[in-house]
Structures are given as C-alpha cells and as structure tokens.
Image (tube, helix red, strand yellow):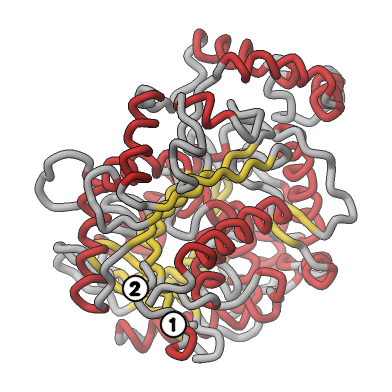
Amino acid sequence: MKPFFFGPSAQPRFGLLHPPAGERARKTGALLCYPGTQEYNISHWAFRKLAGLLSRAGFPVLRFDWAGTGDSAGEIVSGRVSTWIEDVALAAQELKDAAEVERVSLVGMRLGAALAARAVAGGLAVEDLVLWEPVLSGKRYLAELEALDRRELDRLLHEESEGSGELGGYPFTAQMRADLESLDAAAAVPREAKRVWLFTDRPSSEVEQAAQAWAAAGVKASAQVVQDKASVTSGGAREAAALYTTVLEAITARLAEGAA
Amino acid sequence: MRERALLLGEGQNLVSILCEPEPAKKIASAPAVLLWNVGIHHRVGPYRIFTELARRLAAEGFTSVRFDVAGQGDSAPRRGLVDGNAHVADLREVMTFLEKKLGFKAFIPAAFCSGVDACQALATVDARVAGLIYIEPYAWRTPGFWLRYPKRLLDAARWKRRLSARRPEQEAGAGDGGDGALDPVAQEAAQTAAGGIVFSRTKPDPLQFGAELQAMADRGAKMLFLYFGGDTDVNHQGQLWEMIGRSSEQMGGKLEVIFDGGADHILYRPGDRSRALEGMVAWTRRHFGASV
C-alpha cells in the first residue's frame, strides 16, 4: 500500500494505492469513491476492507479523498460538486498511470456514486460502474441530511441550526446546497460504462427506475439488493457500517466477473 | 504549509501525514505534535478536526504527524507482539522517525477520548513528552457533579428532547430515550443492564491518574485538558480538580483546563470545533511558540 498526494500542486488530493495481491494481476484498476460528509468517516473502514478484497482479487486499487475532505488539500467550504466530478477523472488517470493499467472500474458509495456516475455520463470511459447505495437525487439527499442533522442535534441536546449554514456537522454553504439541489444523477445516462451495477440494502423504487431508464437508453444496467446487518442509510446504529461484509464480497465478485 | 504522505514505523506500516510549516515560519526546537485515531475514526479525526489542527499549527510554525496506529484506519497490522500497549509502541516509532530524520527532541501528543489510554502510558515514562493535549479524557462523577446534576432540569434543550421523543410523528431513530435527556445516568444504567452498551473501557483510579499528572508537571511538562459539558460526565470547569484530588496550584500552573459547557463529546457543531481548535493552537503557541 502506498499513500501519496497527486493532482495539482496547488491543491493536491490524497490517495492510497493498493497493488494487486496474489497470483493474478488484472489489467483493470478499481477506483473507489468515498461518500460525503459524515458518511465518509463511518464508511472508511468498509472501504479499507473493500480495497483489500479487490486487491486480493488481482485489482490495483486507488482510494482517494475529495478536494477539501480527509487528507486532501482545501476546505470543505470551498467544495463544489463540479470539482469533485473532475476529481473522479483526475483519480482515474492517476490510477492508470500509477498502476500501469489501461482500464478502470469505479465503485462509488452514496454521494461518491452520484459523482462517479456523472463523471461517466460526462465521458469518462470505464469497464464496470458500481453504484453502492447511490444518491440519485441531490434534493432527496439534502432532505436526508437535514433529517439526520435534526436527529443528531436532538440526540446531542443542541438547538436546531436552521439557517446556520451547517449540516451534518460541517459548514454547509449556500453554493453547496445549490450544487446538490441541481444534482440529478439519474437523469444523466452513464453511457461510457460497459456495465452498471446498482447495489442497495433494501428494495428501492428510485434505484430500480434509474436502472430501467438506463437500460432503456442502451446501458447494461442492473439493480441488486444485498443486505448487510447495518448500513449508512439505516436509522439505527450507523457506525455498524464498519461491519459490512456481504455487500463488499458481492461488489468484488461483480468486478472480478467482468474484468480482464 | 507542506504535507507529505509517509509510511512510518519499523514495519513501514503506519500511514502518516507529515505536516510542516513553511521554512521561514518554522519555530526552532519547537516540539512536534502527534495526532492519531479517535475510536473508529482514522487519523483525520471526527469531522476532520485533526487535519484542521495540523494545518493551523503549521501556520503557527509547528510540525505535526497525524497517523493511524497499527491495524486501524489505513495502517496495516503490526507483525509480531510488543510488550505493553501496542499504540505506545506505534507512538514511539513515529517519535523515532521525527527524532532521527528531522531532529526533533520533544513532542506534544494530542489524544482525543480513548486515545488518552496510550498517551498516558507514554507520557508517564517518556521525558521527551514536553506537553500533552487531552480532549475529553477520563471523567469521574464527583460529589460536585451530583450536586450540580439537578441543574439539568433547568435545561430547555433537555425538556424539548424529552417532549419531542414522545411525539408519535417523531422520525425513526430520533428517540434514543426521551427520559435519558433528563436523567442520562438512569438511562445509561438501563442500557447497560440490557446489554445495550457494547463499548466500555477501564478507567484508571482517579487519584493515581492525578499522581501521574503531578509527576509530569513536576518534571516540567505542560498539559491542556479540554472537557465538554453537553452530553458528558463533566458539568463544571473545576471538576478535574475534584476528580484527581489536586489543585491547579499544586500542579504549578502546568495543567490548564478548557471547559465548554455547551459542546458535545464529538464536537459535532463547527462553532464548537472552532473554539476547541483556537484553544489548542493558542495554548501551543503560548507555551512552545518561543522555543529556540
């Protein structure tokens, strides 16, 4: 495993490259796209495990922090959805260069799935595009964040922070709100993916409809329900997302089936 | 400010970010600051607080390393066994890197919550620890805590939570015990009895903890404790002294306490985090900003 910074020297992104382990080194790299805000922290361990599974399946794997998050340079208040969509292409190229592969597959979770899908719809060619508990509507995502924020403020005995410019424990600018309100990942067909897999932990009509719409548009898209004991989208013990196992194995199997 | 990603430790297994000030800003002989995991959070800390702290300290001239201990965050597990606390061994290996490669002689470990266990084990025996920062360290309910405890009944936010938790339209997951808002101690006891609390740590004896802090103060180490009062076992600025049975004067002013009664244990709100960060940076600047 190699930690490193990449991208523009004025605002480098942090990445972790996992070389392929085992006997078989595939010619396709796997790029993992974290979710946003507090979901990043609680799913970090799951991403580490997923990187390990994919590495052992022969994939070189790159995990990276979005601009203004984690160890990457910048502040979250400067974050823009358009910048993060560019980050996907930037990281994909970095993976190709660093691992000396010609093809990449993407795995994105929640907001990371939306950003990955938009990057592919915008022209980034990939083998497999895995959308894990995807955010398909930015407006719905905002509503979920607001509900979560109310619960958390209530649990921690704080007053509600409506109009405070905060959400989910982070500063939340009007620009970011506008960016997310206009984010409609379902509307942009990810035509540059050879295969699209949508994973959820419970049946979702929104996800089913997106898969059907994309299939009707000529994309090989399929929705699949894989239940783990907990998830970042459950209302209960959200930290239990660290215990994901089943869905990680399912994602790894899907990528391994299709990749050279 | 310049950041480098490194693999540190004897096994080259500790994923680390070295954060350095601009050369012109660097304070000669200032200690290096050490930051590491907080519970399930990797080295960036809850809500990215350690990334922010490292960068603010760099702007003041201080170098830091934020890293994942072996087997947690992004770091690979340690090969083989170590005597004692394995996290202490990780801390020592990072200190050795900073000492041998960058010439640092003194260190300020900053521990958040459970990170205090390793920090205390290190700081009590390693004189290179010139200062330490404890964010939400051990807390014990003192007689003073219980005297102040009824004041929660005057807290409007607690009543609001109790009342809202009883509304049938309340969203799923919101009501983790409306009664707990008014009597968190009873709620905790009920959860424990039901097997609902799965994470617990063994706290040291408070008087022994105080004696260890006294020994550190006597050798000249500076200490900053940050306690928050929103959802914790601390409800007063002076509770630390009640807990450890010592006074600030006995410590020779070497131990300072910042108490933010409105902040919660994980510093959920950006404003609370910002005040905590300001406090930590100001304390570091005041005590170590003139190092030569």
The picture quadrant where one finds residue A20 is bottom left
Do residues under tags 1 and 2 come within 8 Å of each other at their CB atoms?
no
Q: Amino acid at mark 1?
A: Lys
Q: Amino acid at mark 2?
A: Pro
Q: Look at the image and tell me in which quarter the C terminus of chain A lies.
A: bottom left
Q: Look at the image and tell me in which quarter the N terminus of chain A lies.
A: bottom left
B233 relative to B167 in the view: left or right: left
Foreground residue among A1 and B179: B179
Foreground residue among A237 and B97: B97
Residue to which mark 2 is pinned: A3
- Residue at image position (47%, 14%) is B195
- Counting from the top left corner in percent of width and height, residue B97 is at 22, 70
Residue to which mark 1 is pinned: B26
- Counting from the top left corner in percent of width and height, residue B265 is at 60, 39
Q: Dot 2 surroundings within 10 Å: few (below 14), some, or many (20 or more)?
A: many
Foreground residue among B278 and A198: B278
Residue A198 in sight in this render: no
Foreground residue among A207 and B223: B223
Note whether B161 is above or below A100 in the view shown.
above
- Counting from the top left corner in percent of width and height, residue B102 is at 26, 78
Chain to which mark 1 belongs: B
Which numbered marker is on residue B7?
A: none
Q: What element does badge 1 sit on?
A: loop
How far apart marks 1 and 2 lie (CA) works out to 25 Å
Chain to which mark 2 belongs: A
